[in-house]
Image: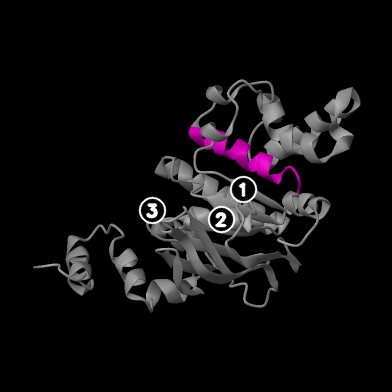
Amino acid sequence: MSPETRTPATASRPLLELSGLRKEFGGRNVNVAVDDVSLEVREGETLALVGESGCGKTTLTRLLLRLLEPTAGSVRFDGQDLATVSAAELRAVRRQMQVVLQDPYSSMNPRMRITDIVAEPLITHDPAVRGRRGRARARERVGELLEAVGLNAGIQDRYPHEFSGGQRQRVSIARALALRPRLLVLDEPTSALDVSVQATVLELLADLQTRLGLTYVFVSHNLAVVRQVADRVAVMRRGRLVEVGEAAQVFHTPQHPYTRQLLDAVPVLDPRRGRRAAERAPRTSGESR
């Protein structure tokens, strides 16, 4: 779906608010991975976070999920400052924030059956599905989740290696939905898949967002995919945000030279367009003709 056909979530309230986030690694030789990032993610929207490898996208998502502690700044989810909540409150927040990773196979225990993989967050957070009495309830819920992502509920007793990459990613999405979250962080969710499979997974994500009212942070370096899914785009370079805007505006009238470079680097079928883009791209210092 192109940005022109999506309805921007401009009227929605912020679900996630990042303010002045900074993350440093190292001792004497400090590496600043995220530098003074402030950003809002509106309820019900898809915010795409884009930039080249090593720009800080993954570190930023770990900060917003509170898998890393920031050196400075704050993360607020639904008005709650995650640095000040109690352990019990943080546990409740974690139910509402889930992640889908790039490589579904590496995020699964190959010795576990699909039913146990999808039920794992349920067992961790919901006492009602633990023990013998809860096993039937967990299995029923897993079947519902698998069907919600386009898989047959009868596959529960199979193992991850028995499925294709696209099917495994659907299992990962089912697991992420188990606790009925409000926010999904999608970290390159289609980059390990064939192009044809990518399209079906993107369609699934769009359908789930409509049906369940989900909010997405979609991390990607693939601007062709971002163009299909994003309501807004945040461009990251060297740990900082250099441009944030509605998707249509960022793609049609980018404001920052780095954003223009990223767009000009997208492969095109017409070689003449590619040459014109190369001529427009700003040259870095020291670059010769």
Q: Which amino acid does the dot numbered 3 rest on?
A: Ser
How many other residues sit within 10 Å of disc 1, few (<14), some (14-19) or many (≥20)?
A: many
- Up the image or down, 244 lies above or below 267; here it is below
User: Can you identify the residue that label 3 sits on?
Assistant: 53
Highlighted magenta segment, given as a residue range: 165-180
The quadrant where residue 139 appears: top right
Tag 1 residue:
99
Q: Label 2's element? A: helix
Q: Is residue 31 left or right of residue 173?
A: left
Q: Amino acid at mark 1?
A: Val
Where is residue 186? Give x, y as percent: 56, 51
Magenta span: helix, strand or loop, mainly?
helix
* Alpha carbon distance from label 3 to label 1: 19 Å
Vertical placement of 35 versus 219: above or below?
Answer: below
Residue designated by label 2: 61
Label 1: element kind? strand
**First reached walking from the N terminus: tag 2 or tag 3:** 3
Mark before the other along the chain sequence, 1 or 2: 2
